[in-house]
Image (tube, rainbow, N blue to C red):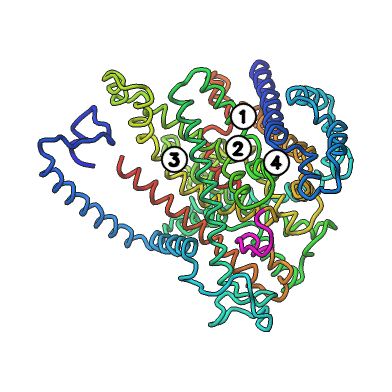
Amino acid sequence: MTRYLAVRLAQALGVLWAAYTVSFVVLYALPGDPVSLLYGGDSSDISPEQLAAVRAEYGLDRPLPVQYLTQLGHVLQGDLGTSVVNGRPVTDLVAEAVPPTAQIAALGLVLALVLGGGLAIVATYVRSRALSHTLLSLPPLGVAIPSFWFGLTLVQWFSFTFPVFPAVGNKGFASLVLPAITLALPTGALVAQMLSRSLLGTLHEPWADTARAKGAGRVRVHLRHALRNAALPTLTVTGLVIGGLLSGAVVTETVFSRAGLGRLTATSVGAQDVPVVQGIVLFAATVYVLVNLLVDVLYPLLDPRIVRVRRPRAAAAPTGPAGEPALVGAA
Amino acid sequence: MTAVDALTPLADPTADRSAPGDAGVRGRDEDLVARHVWRGRLADVLRRPGLLVALVWAGLVLVAAFAPHVLASGDPLTGVPADKLQGPSGSHWFGTDQLGRDLFTRVVHGTHLTLEAALVAVGVGLVVGSLLGLLAGFVGGVLDDVVMRTVDVLLSIPSLLLSLALITALGFGTINVAVAVGLASVASVARIMRSEVLRVRTSVYVEAAHAGGSRWWSVLFQHVLPNSAGPVVVLAALELGAAILAVSALSFLGYGEPPPAPEWGALVSGGRDYLRTSWWLTTLPGLTIAASVLAAGRISRALDGDRAGAR
């Protein structure tokens, strides 16, 4: 077990370092550095000497490998640099933005699990083929609806036509509800798709027949036997689900004019504030890695076969065979 | 496919089967088979109303993208101020916006921008992803390890965030948005392509081609690529839907073409200020996006089913 944990931890650190490298390549090695992006386009009033001075201040005049290593050194000490727009430390900006996003993401996750999971359980339980088909056609619909339009429609109905919830802002629990529903739509659809596919699979397993033969009722077979086994593959996409919530927050917080990580991302991209965007990408990768590490640690407790069989590859890639639904869910 | 394939264990499903001797007879046979297959397909489509609707919608979207004047003859950029903010009616199917521009005309003319961006995105993702997957699977060894670890890392960053990072570096505009969305999808394409290549690489006809003295690149492009492209084609249709969503989300956030351009996402965001009074300004473009994504998904599922049936 200790070995298993040590290997996972080393892998997690490796992924983080690589994610940092990818973000560096994307943001610094592509043509155009942060300073010329910021002052470049319409900068007849800034002399080349001034630009060079600003570049030197941010260390952008040095060769790329040197920049990479110095920056990596700073990141290892917990310093993600400063915003080129307002000069504040990136760590502060991100730390301030996380709590409001965490609130809607947590509520959204709960809604997605309850509604998506509930839909999958009911759709695979009902005997009527027509009802089951109708229910199973809902998740693709949920994935196809653009969440920015869905959020606006919620505002239109529940803030304007029936003034129940506020349309914008960060104040109180009521302001969480509509953003959380908006976030929960694509996430819940993803959960429902994964769980219903997995449930249909487990219901045809021989041990489900055995349970039925021993006289277990349909509810018992469904909830106690099938669901517990079907939930395991769904657990492996938790990382993707959390990632989906984070990227969903960019659109959702813009729609509802809420402060948070998504809003910070949208404004930083708009202002081409490279250090902040890199900090947010690193934060998202860290969250993904931590969630997967947690899943990896929980997995052997829930399913003892994992450690005994000793097939590191199978568990090491939580995005493995289940990676494909990300295509639909991520957008 | 024909019975020849089923009887020949070495048969490569894509290999050229026509021998010089019986070209005439075979030509007529294949013609008959092809006509039969097409009639069967047509009947199949008619039996599935969902697929039929999806195909009709996809056709309309294509017409709107490449010949917008057929569907809406007006000018998307100039309006009649006296007709501003009118609801949907016979003369303005989707209503009008705050400047009196006809929303239907704007949606139709915006199709070109949005669909072009989505197609470029899928193209970039498919070409780069397939090449990486092909090489990783075919060459194997260190290259395979390097490519697949990079893919794992790319998958650990939510794809919208990756697109946003790329947009920060590349700048705004339809094509930059398209490239950013495409590059963000490279990882998943590469993964699927590689797994298919690994399956095909060990098959008997590839071994036969090697043994027959074909060069590695000819084996790669004549045998491995065509036989492992199937799942990637299905993925392409699905990706097109995801790309339409991603592109319009980014244009909603304001990273696409600057304002008068009627990109679908920008149309929804433009209607935001009139949400209280003019529901059609956000809802009708929004529904157009949703319908297009659904159609792409439905067609992708049909392609997947055809492939499963053919196997």
Mark 1 neighbour density, 10 Å: few (under 14) some (14–19) many (20 or more): some
Q: Amino acid at mark 1?
A: Tyr
**Chain designation of label 1:** A
Query: In the rendered structure, are the residues bearing label 2 and label 1 in contact, judged by CB atoms less than 8 Å apart?
Result: yes
Mark 2 is surrounded, within 10 Å at the Cα level, by few (under 14), some (14 to 19) or many (20 or more) other residues, namely many
Q: Which mark is residue B169?
A: 4
Q: CA distance from mark 3 to mark 2?
A: 26 Å
Coordinates of residue B196 in the picture (x, y in percent): 42, 32
**Cα distance, mark 2 to mark 1?**
8 Å
Q: Which residues are magenta?
A: B256-269
Tell me if residue B265 is in the magenta stretch.
yes
Tell me the amino acid under the disc marked 4: Ala
**Which of pointers 3 and 1 indicates the residue nearer the eye?**
3
The quadrant in which residue A307 appears is top right
* Disc 3 target residue: B232
Specify the amino acid type for callout 3. Answer: Val
Pointer 2 or 1: first along the chain: 2
Subunit ID for the residue under disc 2: A
Distance of mark 1 from mark 4, alpha carbons? 39 Å
